[in-house]
Image: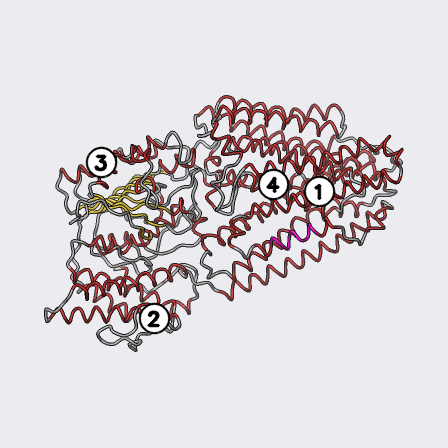
């Protein structure tokens, strides 16, 4: 069997030398273990297993939470199952799932008992064959015929293992009906057959209902009733056909949050179900619904059906399931489970050896369990030897007929103490980390970051010198740091320090909101000082020519502050305060009657803001018409979709709705690409007002005008796409983010003296990250909007859905990056007015190299810092639940930053090249 394989405690990529060491040490013990298995005399309790997986079903729906019963709505939705629990026919458990709470690693945990890592989140979208020892492989080798109906993940994990199968896609979340009908249509036929030993039924519909509408979706009740009917049909078939040796096990892979998502480590997500129907010798009393670990399912099934426990299993036997066994057999089962975990401890702790008695005599007397101490090797040795000695003493007394119930209970307690302690420790250290390789990688990242930051510092000095040459008033402040600049730098330092705290990572949104608002307050203070200074110097001139400008300046920064406060109150993100009331929850409680008007008004104001920003640039009339039409056509399609199909709870999935969304994609993409490609070719080259006629200056003015219009097209089309993809409740935050960014750039463009360019870009970066959390995102996977990733998708496509998921999740950071084009244009246009001469090399520095390096440099600091922290926290209690998900977001944010900078850099380079060629062409013709 699979037990003949060498011990491989993880799939983390250990070196060959490490593997050889494990083999040479464990193999003799493994042979002994196999002989013990053969002589165990533990008969299989059952002949056939029906494993029904209800994807995403929280145990809370059936068993309640804590000492509270299940909510009445859910009890009424599953009456037959509740009757089985109330009569004691079924035994229910809260099977705590380990993060990440996504399907593939949870299935692996149930059949192999191994604890996965967050790399499994990526592998979940491209499942590979499971090569570790597992129950399916065990059953296959002893000749079981197995049938699988439902989620095709099983077919990818265990190819060729099933006699009959009918798989369905697991990621097409818009399908809540056919995905389950495809399973149930075979059910009656399979229940009438007698050729199979294992029947797997994996229902996906309830999980899809959660993704599309949350726990309180109007589809949830009917879906629970459907699952209840399936359980009823299976159980009645077992009773009518007298299948006393058949066990029905109803499990879920994970739970779900209030909005129906999962992936993180909250109670709602990890609260999976295990329901056993058909246990022998049940006492017809309601169970107390104990809590076990999901990996405990593996050794329990193995011993119930007479196969060896998979060698990498970190689970412990659920002893209550073995009531039909005699006392000696139960102790033997605990002994086998203990020996299996002891071998895993030996693989992790090379010095673990129980050659000595560890202070325990042959009768198990000596240290009490609580008195076991010393290093880890001595501690585990003490626990294991004590349990083994008590067991040996119990068996010797049995021979002489002097056994007492107290001796039996002491032995069981000793085994359980060892099993729980060992399982918890192994689960936390399930993956060996090659620290040397990781440290080498972090060193390389640090060096590359230092090179990038040194280049950025050099460019910052060059840009300051260029601006000094163009304007006279910068000379007095070129090397002077202001409080707003110091605070902007301190934000980076504080964020780096906060990464070492699990609590601050969970509630990171508060840091971004607070820091961004404080920076804007400092800018407001600086604006007030600037206005007061101008008023003091020339009061009459100020009143006549500067009052309007000062009003716009003050209004802009105050609006940025107000919109930031509204965004802060829109979603209560994070982990600890997510249930607190906020604006989004209030709107959702009012339903579509409130949400749809907000959605429509947001669309109208977004287009109005776009046209206002377009008119302010004073382009030619033809440009206003062309660019305006690029806004209006997709806006009309989005408006049509909102009015016709949009609901607050469930995205539309009809063919006409899908076709309309696809048409909107095409129009948005075509208009954006067309404007970006064609506009530089037709942009007139003119001198700015107040400038002397200079050929290079006129060319660069054309470049800045082009970048302004292209940047405006980028951000308006991006926001229209977000109004289509985001949940309807997020329409107002999208509008506020857009107007906040426009107001911030307006403030910077009229402020005198001008803020440094890196400060403007850092402010945009901070607003993008604050907006990221304002849209309901957190550092847990559960807040990813999976349902939106299937908008306009008629069939499952991992690549296309992944792209849409990325677009939805990083809406705000990408919006901030795309707005850099308008920032570059406005800053360059102002500097050109005062410039006596313009050099191409200098313009490329200020409009291409420097602006692109600022977000890259900031991101490199965060990436290197958090990679280092993750390496230091690799053995932390929350490494899988907090630090690993955060690192995935850090890596995804890095991809977003690089993609946004690439788009900006490519657009600037293309605009320069196009207008330069146009100039050369006109010169050649003349």
Question: Does the magenta portion include 492?
Answer: yes
Q: Residue at x 53, y 22 (%)?
A: 640
Near mark 1 (Cα within 10 A), the count class, few <14, some 14-19 or many ≥20, is some
N-terminal label among 3 and 2: 3
Horizontal arrangement in the rendering, residue 600 relative to residue 522 (left or right): left
Pick the front one: 168 or 278 = 278
Q: Residue visible at 24% across and 44% down?
A: 199
Asked if one can make out residue 678 in the rendered structure from this viewpoint, the answer is yes
Q: On residue 301, which mark appears?
A: none
The label shown at residue 909 is: 1
Sequence-wise, the earlier of marks 3 and 1 is 3
Horizontally, is 774 left or right of 697 in the view? left
In what element is the residue under mark 4?
A: helix
Residue that label 3 marks: 232
What is the magenta range? 487-495
Mark 3 and mark 4: span between their CA atoms? 50 Å
Q: Are marks 3 and 1 in contact (CB under 8 Å)?
A: no
Mark 2 — residue?
Answer: 372
**Which mark, residue 814?**
4
Q: Tag 1's secondary structure?
A: helix
Residue 226 is at least partly visible in this image = no
- Alpha carbons under labels 3 and 2: distance apart: 49 Å
In which quadrant will I find the N terminus? bottom left
């Amino acid at each position: 069997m699979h037990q003949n394989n060498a011990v491989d405690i993880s799939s983390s990529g250990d070196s060959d030398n490490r593997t050889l060491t494990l083999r040479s040490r464990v193999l003799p013990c493994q042979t002994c273990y196999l002989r013990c298995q053969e002589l165990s005399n533990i008969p299989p309790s059952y002949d056939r297993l029906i494993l029904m997986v209800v994807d995403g079903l929280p145990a809370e729906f059936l068993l309640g939470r804590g000492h509270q019963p299940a909510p009445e709505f859910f009890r009424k939705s599953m009456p037959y199952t509740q009757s089985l629990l109330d009569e004691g026919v079924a035994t229910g458990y809260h099977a705590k799932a380990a993060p990440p709470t996504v399907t593939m690693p949870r299935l692996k945990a149930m059949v192999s008992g191994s604890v996965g890592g967050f790399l499994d989140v990526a592998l979940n979208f491209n499942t590979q064959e499971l090569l570790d020892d597992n129950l399916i492989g065990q059953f296959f080798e002893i000749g079981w015929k197995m049938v699988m109906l439902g989620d095709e993940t099983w077919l990818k994990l265990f190819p060729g293992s099933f006699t009959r199968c009918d798989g369905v896609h697991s990621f097409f979340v818009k399908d809540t009906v056919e995905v389950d009908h495809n399973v149930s249509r075979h059910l009656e036929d399979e229940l009438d057959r007698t050729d199979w030993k294992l029947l797997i039924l994996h229902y996906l519909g309830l999980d899809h209902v959660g993704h599309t509408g949350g726990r309180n979706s109007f589809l949830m009740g009917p879906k629970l009733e459907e699952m209840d009917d399936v359980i009823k049909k299976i159980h009645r078939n077992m009773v009518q056909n007298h299948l006393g040796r058949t066990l029905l096990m109803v499990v879920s892979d994970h739970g779900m949050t209030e909005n129906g998502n999962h992936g993180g480590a909250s109670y709602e997500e990890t609260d999976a179900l295990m329901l056993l129907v058909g246990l022998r010798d049940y006492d017809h009393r309601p169970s107390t619904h104990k809590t076990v670990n999901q990996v405990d399912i593996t050794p329990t099934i193995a011993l119930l059906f007479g196969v060896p426990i998979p060698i990498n299993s970190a689970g412990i036997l659920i002893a209550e399931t073995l009531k039909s066994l005699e006392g000696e057999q139960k102790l033997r089962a605990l002994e086998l489970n203990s020996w299996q975990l002891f071998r895993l401890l030996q693989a992790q702790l090379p010095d673990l050896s129980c050659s000595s008695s560890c202070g325990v005599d042959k009768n198990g007397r000596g240290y009490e369990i609580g008195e076991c101490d010393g290093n880890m090797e001595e501690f585990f040795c003490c626990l294991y030897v004590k349990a083994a000695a008590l067991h040996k003493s119990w068996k010797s007394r049995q021979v002489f007929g002097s056994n007492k119930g107290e001796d039996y209970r002491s032995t069981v307690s000793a085994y359980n103490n060892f099993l729980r302690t060992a399982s918890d420790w192994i689960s936390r250290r399930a993956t060996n980390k090659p620290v040397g390789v990781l440290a080498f990688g972090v060193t390389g990242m640090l060096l590359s970051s230092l090179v990038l930051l040194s280049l950025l510092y050099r460019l910052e000095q060059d840009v300051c010198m260029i601006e000094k040459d163009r304007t006279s008033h910068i000379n007095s402040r070129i090397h002077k740091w202001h409080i707003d600049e110091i605070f902007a730098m301190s934000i980076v330092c504080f964020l780096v320090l906060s990464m070492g705290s699990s609590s601050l990572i969970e509630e990171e949104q508060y840091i971004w909101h607070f820091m961004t608002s404080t920076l804007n307050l400092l800018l407001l203070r600086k604006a007030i000082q600037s206005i007061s200074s101008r008023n003091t110097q020339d009061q009459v001139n100020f009143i006549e020519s500067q009052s309007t400008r000062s009003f716009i300046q003050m209004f802009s920064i105050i609006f940025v502050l107000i919109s930031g406060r509204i965004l802060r109150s829109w979603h209560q993100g994070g982990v600890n305060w997510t249930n607190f009331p906020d604006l989004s929850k209030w709107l959702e409680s009012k339903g579509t009657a409130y949400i749809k008007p907000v959605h429509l008004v947001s669309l109208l104001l977004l287009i109005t803001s776009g046209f206002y920003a377009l008119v302010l640039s004073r382009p030619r009339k033809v440009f206003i018409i062309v660019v305006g039409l690029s806004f209006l056509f997709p806006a009309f399609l989005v408006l049509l979709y909102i009015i016709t199909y949009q609901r607050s709870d469930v995205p539309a999935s009809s063919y006409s709705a899908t076709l309309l969304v696809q048409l909107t994609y095409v129009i948005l993409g075509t208009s954006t690409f067309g404007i970006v490609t064609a506009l530089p070719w037709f942009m007139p080259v003119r001198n700015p007002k107040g400038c002397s006629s200079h050929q290079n200056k006129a060319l660069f003015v054309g470049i800045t005008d082009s970048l302004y219009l292209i940047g405006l097209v980028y951000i308006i089309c991006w926001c229209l796409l977000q109004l289509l993809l985001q949940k309807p409740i997020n329409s107002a935050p999208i509008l506020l983010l857009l107007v906040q960014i426009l107001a911030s750039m307006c403030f910077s463009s009229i402020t005198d003296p001008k803020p440094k360019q890196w400060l403007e870009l850092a402010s945009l970066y901070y607003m993008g990250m604050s907006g990221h959390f304002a849209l309901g995102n957190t550092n847990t996977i559960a807040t990813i909007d999976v349902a939106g990733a299937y908008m306009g998708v008629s069939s499952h496509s991992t690549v296309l859905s992944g792209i849409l998921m990325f677009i939805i999740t990083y809406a705000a950071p990408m919006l901030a990056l795309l707005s850099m084009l308008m920032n570059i244009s406005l800053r360059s246009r102002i500097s050109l007015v005062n410039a006596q001469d313009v050099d191409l090399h200098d313009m490329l520095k200020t409009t291409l190299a420097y602006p692109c390096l600022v977000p890259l440099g900031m991101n490199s600091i965060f990436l290197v810092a958090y990679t280092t922290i993750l390496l230091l926290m690799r053995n932390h209690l929350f490494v899988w639940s907090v630090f690993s998900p955060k690192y995935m977001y850090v890596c995804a944010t890095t991809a977003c930053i690089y993609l946004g900078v690439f788009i900006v850099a490519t657009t600037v380079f293309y605009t320069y090249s196009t207008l330069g060629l146009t100039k050369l062409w006109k010169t050649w013709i003349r």
